[in-house]
Amino acid sequence: MDVYAIIAFLMGVALGFLRRGKEERAKILEVLVTSMFLGLISAIALSYLVLDDAGLGEFVRTFGLVVAAITYVMFFIAGTYIGDILEKFRK
């Protein structure tokens, strides 16, 4: 397992445990999708404007970053579930 995935998971557990009530997981995912879409559009536009037709490699690398970010957010959301369960046991 990746170290960053573990860190994202532990941050999710901490957020779920320390914040009272249920977390808005759908909103977290919505913000991620919107941010990734805007970032992908910006990266494509800048690769054509700045790098003078950088080619397919830039798109593949950008797509890989998007997939990695989505993976880390999924670990974070799973951590919020665990944190909410731990919060229920504390009461």
Image (tube, helix red, strand yellow):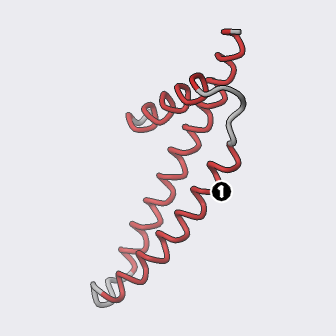
Apparent side of residue 81 relative to residue 62 in the rendered image (left or right):
right
What crowding class fits label 1: few (fewer than 14 Cα within 10 Å), some (14-19), or many (20 or more)?
few
Residue 77: percent from the left, percent from the top?
Answer: 61, 38
From what the image shows, is residue 80 above or below residue 48?
A: above
Residue located at (64% from left, 16% from top): 86
Dot 1: element = helix
From what the image shows, is residue 88 above or below residue 51?
A: above
**In front: 73, or 15?**
15
Residue located at (49% from left, 77% from top): 41
Looking at the rendered image, the quarter that the C terminus falls into is top right
Residue 59: percent from the left, percent from the top?
Answer: 42, 74
**Quarter of the figure with residue 50:** bottom left
Reading the image, the residue beneath label 1 is: 30
Number of numbered discs on residues: 1
Looking at the rendered structure, the kind of residue marked 1 is: Glu
Residue located at (52% from left, 71% from top): 38
Looking at the rendered image, the quarter that the N terminus falls into is top left
Residue located at (36% from left, 81% from top): 46
Residue furthest left as drawn? 51
Residue 81: percent from the left, percent from the top?
Answer: 66, 29
From what the image shows, is residue 71 above or below residue 85?
A: below
**Quarter of the figure with residue 21:** top right
Residue 88: percent from the left, percent from the top?
Answer: 72, 15
**In front: 56, or 81?**
81
Apparent side of residue 38 relative to residue 61 in the rendered image (left or right):
right
Apparent side of residue 52 relative to residue 61 in the rendered image (left or right):
left
Residue furthest front as drawn? 20
